[in-house]
Amino acid sequence: MKDIHKNMLLAVVLVVVTFAAYRPAVDGDFIWDDDDHVTDVPAVTSPDGLRDIWLKPGATCQYYPLTFTGFWVQYRLWQDQPFFFHVVNILLHGLNGVLLWLLLRKLKVPGSYIAAGVFVLHPVNVMSVAWICELKNVLAGAFLLGSAWCYVAQEDGRIPSAKVHPPPNLLYAASLGLFIMALLSKSSTAFLPAALGLLLWWRRGEIRPPEIYRLFPFFIFAGGMVLMTLFVERNLVFVEGEQITLMPPERIIVAGRSFWFYLGKLLKPWPLSFFYPSWKINADSTLQFLYPASVAVLLYALWEFRAKITKAPFVALAIFLMSWPAVVLVQVIYMMQYSFVSDHWIYFGTMAVIPLFVGIVATAMQRSPAILKRGIAVVVLLVLAMLTWDRTHVYRDLGTLWRDTLQKNPEAWIAHNNYGLMLLSEGKLDEAAQHIERALELRPDITKHQYNLAKVYEAIGNADKCIELYEEVVRLRPDFVAAYRPLAHAYLIKNNPEAAIDALSRGIEKDPSNAAFHNDIGGIFLKEGRLTAAEWHLRRSLDLHPDNAPAIANLRNLYRFRELSRREGAEPPVQGDPQ
């Protein structure tokens, strides 16, 4: 009983320390991409959206139904109050620290509690905790660790001399169920079956056939969820922008280089950036293959010397490699167009590497005085807590986030673009133009930059520049239908209704069912006195959108004008044909 109370106290301390270190995060707002996960997702904000979350792949930006169910439940409870979303993320991260400690203790890893403390306080995990949309990481992490603990416990329970409660079969069912929940929260947890196999081999020196058979269902569910994720993200979810493509040799380079990058950030967690400078990948360069080659050499050496230095380093680094760096060999993530590495991609990997580092230090200091060991642990945890506290302030709001990113990575074109849009919304037009122009310089191939820059000049009142930019947008991407209406508006400012009509007509060619295009062109015809053409387009707009208030108002004006002309006996204006 005394041990139970002590363990409960230690668990509470982990959670409290986690919350204390992340306290500044609870004052943060929704930031970039949170709208695509919570506030602007009908399946999340609608009371009856739960069915779409589970049964309509593509209703959310990723098919992680358990994560989006979490968002849906939270939105029912506190609507769009970011404070509570942050609290949930922080508490789940603290819970993950407790679960990691329990798992490491069951695996008899030296320094397990300190390792859990380093995990919850390490600033590289701030992105996964302080960013609301990364509920998928902390939620999936809880299920992942719970599944791993149950699996290890059920394997221990199958030893004849063991007395484990609940029975092994019940623990096995719980492990599989929790793993499925982890997959439904985030599919990159699919590495767990292979990790469990490595852990079994590490503990026993072999994997027997029954143990392999018990892992089969895990691999089946993992493969199925990975295939589902790939299908949804490649076929059902539209992401505006240019998707990055990498050939197999380039993927190998990225995997190898990211392996070393992440290890470096764990050992020296500064400076941290929301977007890191993107690497120049050249598969024709032999030197770039030194990154993956050195990873292979390291793992081979650890394998060869496993009898002398134990199997732990090989197992931990192999799990770390599988948890993220190797993922690029299977799928190129859309966010990689901004940077090939990101802190939130190694949340699961830190669960393997941090215990390795801490375990090595704990073993080396095994004979050291207890006061020295505790003193070093306190200093390390305090430093990490201070770094985490400082880093969480960056996620306070969009302005702070983008300014910090540009300070660390001045060539982050996405940060220039997004910061420029934020400045535009604040009416700081000159600054907005500077940042979006810089984004266009860095990535001239992305037409959205030209579109955004045109919006800035529209706010400034420079119609000529607007026309130039919008025309370039639709020349490069004729299907960019959002550009046709502001282009027509700019032509109207220049008193060129025929060019405006032409712009809207081109928009109708690309999107015939766009009611707004028909209303706008009908309004121009109405002002020009071309009533037949105006009536045709306005009626077409109402056919497409019966509740279209502007079209209804324009049509009423048209009828009043006709009636007034009839009563006054005026000659009807020249009628134009429908365009």
Image: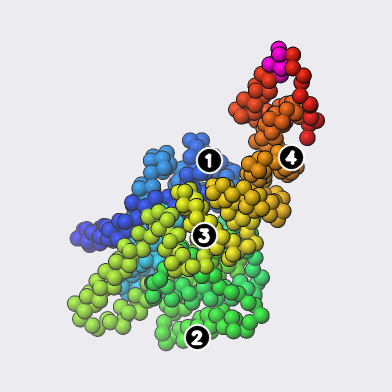
What is the C-alpha distance between the residues marked 3 and 2?
48 Å
Q: Which residues are magenta?
A: 562-568
What is the C-alpha distance between the residues marked 4 and 2?
73 Å
Element class at badge 3:
helix
Point out the tag, 1 or 4, that comes first from the N-terminus.
Answer: 1
Q: Is residue 521 above or below residue 150?
A: above
What is the C-alpha distance between the residues marked 1 and 4?
38 Å
Query: Is residue 506 at least partly visible in the picture?
Result: yes
223 left or right, relative to 265: right
Residue pointed to by mark 3: 435
Closer to viewer: mark 1 or mark 2: 1
Point out the tag, 4 or 3, that comes first from the N-terminus.
Answer: 3
Closer to viewer: mark 3 or mark 2: 3
Point out the tag, 3 or 2, that comes first from the N-terminus.
Answer: 2
Q: Find out whether the residues at labels 4 and 2 contact each other: C-beta distance under 8 Å.
A: no
Residue 498, numbered label: 4
Quadrant of res 389: bottom left
Residue pointed to by mark 2: 301
Quadrant of res 158: bottom left
Quadrant where the C terminus is found in the figure:
top right
